[in-house]
């Protein structure tokens, strides 16, 4: 079935001072009309995604919860499958499972986990996806790959959603986006972070012209199933202001873009609520991006009027 690509919105949150604070944030996201609360997967100052998402689901009624994204290198996919199936079951089928090949160099450096070359990490991700899907399916599953071997394992518990929770795969390079086009339910169009650190080159890789190419990689790999995909995008800056021109001038250097380039930058929202809403609608027409994710509690609140205006349309 073709995806309707109506607007929905997520927020990526990662920290709280207490259980009550985290529950309040989750309920606030739900009350503001956000579809999904996402938690990233890093070793710095953030909550662990599994327990945090379980608590968020428990504190809310309809809010979906998701990983954006788990690093496949940090856990064997057999462990990931069991934890995520449990989370999907205990949230009554509200999980969206984002998984990636890993990118943040400091995580690997500080933990001592070897950061293999990107090609090896993507190979491992591709095998990990096959293991996850196999274990979410009914009955015993076996797999014999270069990186993982599973023998007659019946993945239990079964997830609440069938055939499995929606998979999110996002990236900025041709191979990961092709994998997403073939295997994901939700595809994230992101800047490539080739250095392992967020820098100016990564910011420029999110520019509008580059995004055209990224979407083409997804389309080519997905083929006929492209119409079924939901296209997601992270929003790195959300500034609601009546001084659009001045704000763009002031922010452009940070992104290593001109003010005009930043105005068209798909990962930034700058302007009045009406201007941002018009931009978001135009970008859906251009790139099919209907699932937008802001980052942090401040952005969640700033973007709330945009969410109220567009969600479900």
Image (spheres, grey):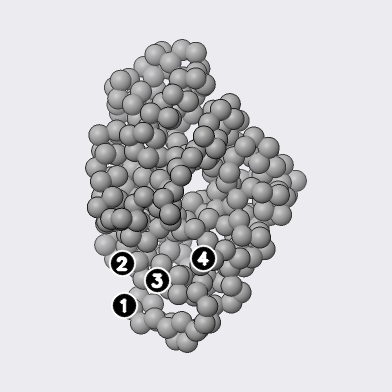
Q: Quadrant of residue 145?
A: bottom left
- Near mark 3 (Cα within 10 A), the count class, few <14, some 14-19 or many ≥20, is some
Could you give the CA–CA distance between mark 3 and mark 2, rounded to whole angstroms?
Answer: 11 Å
Residue occupying image coordinates x 34% and y 56%: 225
Q: Sequence-wise, which precedes: disc 3 or disc 2?
A: 2
Which residue matches tag 4? 164
For the residues carrying marks 3 and 2, which lies nearer the camera in this image? Answer: 3
Can residue 104 be seen from the camera position used here? Answer: no
Give the x, y percent position of residue 193. 33, 46
Task: Left or right? Give the position of 127 relative to 51.
Answer: left
Image height check: is 143 above or below 173? Answer: below
Residue drawn at point x = 38 percent, y = 77 percent: 148
Nearest the camera: 268 or 73? 268
Q: Which mark identifies residue 123?
A: 2
Q: Residues within 10 Å of mark 2 (few under 14, many from 20)?
A: some
> Which quadrant: the N terminus?
bottom left
- Pick whichever of labels 2 and 1 is earlier in the sequence: 2
Secondary structure of residue under mark 4: loop
Note whether 305 is above or below 155 in the view shown.
above
The residue that appears at 67% across and 63% down in the rendered structure is 90
Q: Is residue 243 visible?
A: yes
Marks 2 and 1 in Cβ contact (< 8 Å) = yes
Give the mark toward the camera: 3 or 1. 3
Q: Position of residue 282 (x, y in %)?
A: 38, 28
Tell me the distance, in whole angstroms, between the alpha carbons under discs 1 and 4: 24 Å
Comes first in the chain, label 3 or label 1: 3
Alpha carbon separation for disc pair 3 and 1: 12 Å
Residue 256 placement: quadrant: top left
Residue at the disc numbered 1: 146
Say left or right for 286 vs 292.
left
């Amino acid at each position: 079935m073709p995806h309707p690509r109506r607007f929905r919105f997520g927020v990526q949150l990662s920290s709280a001072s207490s259980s009550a604070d985290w529950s309040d944030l989750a309920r606030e996201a739900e009350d503001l009309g956000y579809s999904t609360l996402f938690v990233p997967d890093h070793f710095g100052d953030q909550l662990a995604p599994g327990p945090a998402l379980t608590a968020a689901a428990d504190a809310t009624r309809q809010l979906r919860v998701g990983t954006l994204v788990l690093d496949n290198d940090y856990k064997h996919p057999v462990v990931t499958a069991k934890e995520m199936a449990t989370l999907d079951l205990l949230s009554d089928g509200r999980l969206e499972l984002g998984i990636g090949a890993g990118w943040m160099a400091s995580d690997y450096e500080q933990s001592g986990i070897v950061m293999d070359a990107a090609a090896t990490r993507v190979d491992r991700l591709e095998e990990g996806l096959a293991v996850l899907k196999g274990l979410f399916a009914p009955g015993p599953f076996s797999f014999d790959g270069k990186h993982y071997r599973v023998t007659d394992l019946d993945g239990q518990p079964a997830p609440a959603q069938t055939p499995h929770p929606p998979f999110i795969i996002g990236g900025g390079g041709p191979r990961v986006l092709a994998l997403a086009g073939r295997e994901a339910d939700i595809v994230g169009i992101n800047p490539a972070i080739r250095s392992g650190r967020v820098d100016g080159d990564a910011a420029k890789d999110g520019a509008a012209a580059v995004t055209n190419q990224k979407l083409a990689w997804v389309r080519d790999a997905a083929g006929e199933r492209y119409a079924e995909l939901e296209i997601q995008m992270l929003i790195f800056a959300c500034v609601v202001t009546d001084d659009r021109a001045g704000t763009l001038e002031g922010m452009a250097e940070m992104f290593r873009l001109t003010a005009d380039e930043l105005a068209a930058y798909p990962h930034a929202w700058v302007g009045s609520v009406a201007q941002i809403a018009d931009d978001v609608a135009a970008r859906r027409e251009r790139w099919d991006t209907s699932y937008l994710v802001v980052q942090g509690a401040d952005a969640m609140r700033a973007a709330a009027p945009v969410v109220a205006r567009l969600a479900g349309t």
